[in-house]
Image: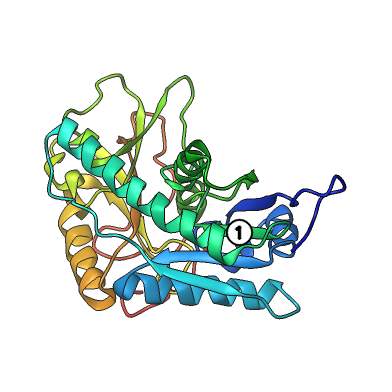
Amino acid sequence: MADAADGSEAPRHILVIGMGAGDPDHLTLAAVKAMRRADVFFVLGKGKEKESLTRLRRDILDEHLTGPYRVVEADDPWRDRTQDDAARYTSAVHDWRHRRADICERLIIEELAPGQCGAFLVWGDPALYDSTLAILDDIRGRGTVEFGHEVIPGISSVSALAARHRVTLNQVGRPIHITPGRRLAQGFPEDDGDIVVMLDGHETFAHLTGRGLWIHWGAYIGTPDEILVSGPLDEVADEISRVRAEARERHGWIMDTYLLRQGPRDGEAAGGERAAGRPVDGADGPVGGPLG
């Protein structure tokens, strides 16, 4: 057990490390340096998604760490995803995060000795649609265990999506909206901006045809199972729904993100490639996996 210079216990320290969207090459130098400081890595997950993502995490650790490392895993608590009412949905998320905090609090107390450094490996960027920072704030507020923490940013699925489709997220003089699918389902912004949609479990895009929209869609971005489809939404919506359903059936889970924007006007280009009815690879090669 480590002690501080004044004889008290040295504080625990937590690293929240953005890992990028899934490609080991997305890891930043800062993230690699942070990983090498960690005494233990904490992983929460469940089911087929846990198996697949845990394997990806271990592949990344194996590639960048030269010595032995310790991973402590715990099952992610069940979450109620059936609530459509905004207030009930928010309450369900807060309840899930609180139960996650209970688990993480136990892991920090039991698996991380005073003076040691623990790490949570977060897909994408910890600042964008991830609960880890809120959970650590919850734990710190309880006063049961003292620790410091720092955040190492990562390449988000949003940035990776744009790169794979070879498009910019913004167009000149126009705003960008980043929203979960459930909020988009409540109303489409009418301010001529571009929309990045995450966490869309209900294929909201399928209800937005007839608006002259163009979509750049990607699933499992940065992984060997990556799928990309791009084109006029009216032409590719059914294809995206089909490949999305097949991928979810095959893997047991799906993680996708997409960009919606008005189709090209006179003198403009939509960017990327038109890919009606087929996945498209942003590097001019075959996409990994059976759908490529």
Q: Residue furthest front?
A: 7
Q: Against 52, is 190 above or below?
A: above
Q: Nearer the viewer, residue 204 or 213?
A: 204
Q: Against 282, is 224 above or below?
A: below
Measuring from the top left, give residue 214's x and y in whole percent.
29, 42
Measuring from the top left, give residue 45's x and y in whole percent.
38, 66
**Residue of label 1:** 119
Measuring from the top left, give residue 222's x and y in whole percent.
49, 64
Q: Nearer the viewer, residue 247 or 7?
A: 7
Residue name at image x 42 percent, y 68 percent = 74
Q: Residue furthest right?
A: 5
Residue name at image x 46 percent, y 37 percent = 169
Quarter of the rendering occupied by the N terminus: bottom right
26 left or right, relative to 182: right
Residue name at image x 12 percent, y 34 percent = 85
Q: Amino acid at mark 1?
A: Ala
Q: Secondary structure at mark 1?
A: strand
